Image (spheres, rainbow, N blue to C red):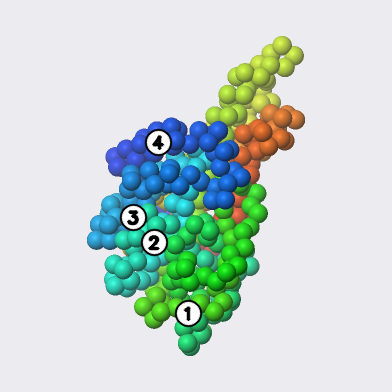
Amino acid sequence: MSVVGNTALKFSEEQAMLLDVARQFCRDKSPIASVRAQLETETGFDAGLWAEMVSLGWAGIALPESVGGSGMGIATLVPVVEAMGRAMLGTPLISSALAAQLLLRAGSSEQAERLLPALAEGAPATIALLEDADWGSDSVALVLDEKGVLQGAKKYVPDAAVASLFVVSVLHRGELALAVVRADQLGEGALRSNTLIDQTKRSANVDFSGIAVAENNIITGPGAAAALRDVRLLGALLVAAEATGSAGACLDTIVEYLKTRKQFGKLIGSYQALKHPTVDILTETDSARSFLYHAATLVGDSALDTDAEIACRMAKAQACQTLLYAGDRAVQFHGGMGFTYDCDAQLYIRRAQWSQQQFGDAQHHRKRLAALLLD
């Protein structure tokens, strides 16, 4: 295989329109003051704003029309998530989209027709995959026994407190499978909220022990493992989209400060020591967007091929590294104020720390890219 590989890059008219609409919506509905107002709330987002996003069709944008979606495919969600990242808008959209993709790719037509319409209509859902908080581990300890009863727990389940549906990876008869659990099946005290570095996000540890799963809510066979692999890559892609948007907003914050802050009678933006890293952030953000939309060009409703895997991993590595650098420079450039939570630079560096841990950091993906490209 060539090291260069597939270099296709297509930004469709639909994606361009969605990006324009999403950017305008997020700019109007999620100014930074509104973001900060949600930091200490229970859910981390405004339920009314989520309802408006649902009314725009974003909850079902990647789902087929047969289940109430728009039938536009997972790639069309990328510009929406990028716009949300730029506005630091935290909602269950990514979690719900990944849960829907897992059901769509692994479930039967009966399961899709029964479970997906509610998600297309805006019922939040999530995936529960982690047990040791390490995306490099494939171990699954949550067991679905012969009686169809779960034993075990999952960690860092995103948006668990608001989810109406959980799609959970389990071991069933010694093989990897998926179980669909309704929120009303959880016992009292089953959710234990996590304290996250990024306060725009929410997650919880969830104890699923003792929950009986109906036969028609169990997904078995090789399709479950294949769908999990694809959804992990799609998760990396959507987090990359969000991180790319956040990096762009972080760059705007840096530039605005460099144009207004004076030191020794001169604008600090005139100093080369600050100009050069700022240009580095600009070029790295542009690179992240190129990787992002290259990956969006290759992913679809069918199983992801090797080119799509390479593209998703490249996008995640580039986007998270870029945001990490941008957030760090934003804090440093703001001086002592940058180390206070009142400074917006803190929001970006915290988002960077959170993003890199979702679906694998840059080192995780580059290790796998080396095997894909160089072996």
Q: Mark 3 or mark 1: which comes first in sequence?
A: 3
Q: Amino acid at mark 3?
A: Glu
Residue corresponding to mark 2: 100
Total numbered badges shown on the rendered structure: 4
How far across and how far down the image is residue 22, in percent? 39, 39
Residue corresponding to mark 3: 121
Left or right of 192 on screen, residue 55: left
Q: Amino acid at mark 4?
A: Phe
> Which of the two discs, 2 and 1, sits closer to the camera?
1
Dot 2: few (<14), some (14–19), or many (≥20) neighbours within 10 Å? many
Dot 4: few (<14), some (14–19), or many (≥20) neighbours within 10 Å? some
Residue corresponding to mark 4: 25
Dot 1: few (<14), some (14–19), or many (≥20) neighbours within 10 Å? some
Residue corresponding to mark 1: 212
Look at the image and tell me in which quarter the N terminus lies: bottom left
User: Outermost residue toward the left?
Assistant: 66
Q: From mark 1 to mark 4, how far is it between C-alphas?
A: 41 Å
Q: From mark 2 to mark 1, how far is it between C-alphas?
A: 22 Å
Dot 3: few (<14), some (14–19), or many (≥20) neighbours within 10 Å? some
